Image (cartoon, rainbow, N blue to C red):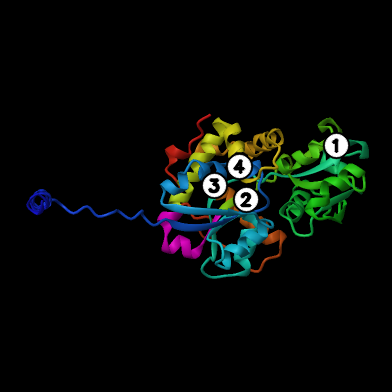
Amino acid sequence: MQRRQFLSSALITASTIGSPTVWAQAAPRLTPIKFTLDFRITGQTSPLFLAQQRGYYRDEGLDVSIDVGAGSVASITRIASGVYQMGLGDISSLIEFQANQPGTPLVQAVYQYYNRAPFAIIGRKDRGITSDFRSLEGKKIAAAAVESTRRAWPMVARKLRLKENHFAWSTTDFASRDNVVVRGDVDGATYFHDSAVSLFARMKLEDLSVLRYTDAGVNLYGNAILASNAMVTQNPAAVAGFLRATNRAIQEAMADPAAAIAATKVRESILNEAVELERWRITAEYIAAPDTRGHGLGDVLKRTLEQQVDEVVDVYGLKSRPGVEGVFNRAMLPTADLRSIKA
């Protein structure tokens, strides 16, 4: 018995001598990225959640967490503080931030999400508001105290040769904006055009006038994907990977909006899919604006951005003028073939 056991042990030992040792492979370490939205979770940013659900960030070696935001300006300060590495924020606000923080940019835009800012004033037709901005004269318009659509109004007034006090502002928080318009406490309110779907769900669209800033000839880039100086300088590959994954998801969201909204609803279950599909339809018009047919998603025209910098500096009375290269860094953009409009 002992001999048989000894022989079995010897055979096993002999069969394993010289065999290569197989070590368990540790999973590659993912680079963490904390991303701040500009506002709450809606269809406007559905590609981010589609990329997350389909594992595109993980495929790029990234562990991405996405948090709700507190406004386009807050996104910039969150990233500058180092608490977040990337986020979504308004380009005009970034220009102002850099003008007030001269030197090496603490935050840069690395992918232009809204090729045109979706700024609009939505007014009640029964209060005499038409598609002409001049019809706003003497009206009462609701807006949050610090928000990009309100702050950009002087650019529209200048373009149309109207007085900045063409109408009266009524300061209202975001959550109350629809209510004051529906009740008639005000004649209209400022919105991101795609954010107004909540109002459209409560009032008939034919009873409202949508005054888009782009219709006034004000060509402003809107919210962009931003990155901290630390991420840009220390880990540009991670930024590039994030942009590739997001760009891929944007293309897929345009081809199949329902899938993108479904992915977003997994994160925010209370969303109404029909409302968010309509929201994304409007958002996509601003993401894939006419310029993108020439240079692709995510990029900017240097001259248009230079004009925006000049206008922001002038209208806001800033003491310094940031260079466009510091505002927008295209070095980590996906290749042009990946960014070309497919549809």
Q: In this picture, which residue range is highlighted in magenta?
A: 226-239
Q: Please tell me whether residue 238 belongs to the stretch shown in magenta.
A: yes
Per the image, label 2 sits on a secondary structure element best described as strand
Label 1: which residue? 130
Task: From the image, state whether disc 3 or disc 2 is nearer to you.
Answer: 2
Say which amino acid is labelled 3.
Val
Say which amino acid is labelled 4.
Val
- Mark 4 vs mark 3, CA separation in Å: 32 Å
- Rendered view: 339 above or below 148: above
Residue 34's image quarter?
bottom right
Q: Residues within 10 Å of mark 4 (few under 14, many from 20)?
A: few
Label 3: which residue? 300
Q: Earlier in the sequence, mark 4 or mark 3?
A: 4
- Mark 1 vs mark 3, CA separation in Å: 32 Å
- Mark 3 vs mark 2, CA separation in Å: 12 Å
- Rendered view: 129 above or below 96: above
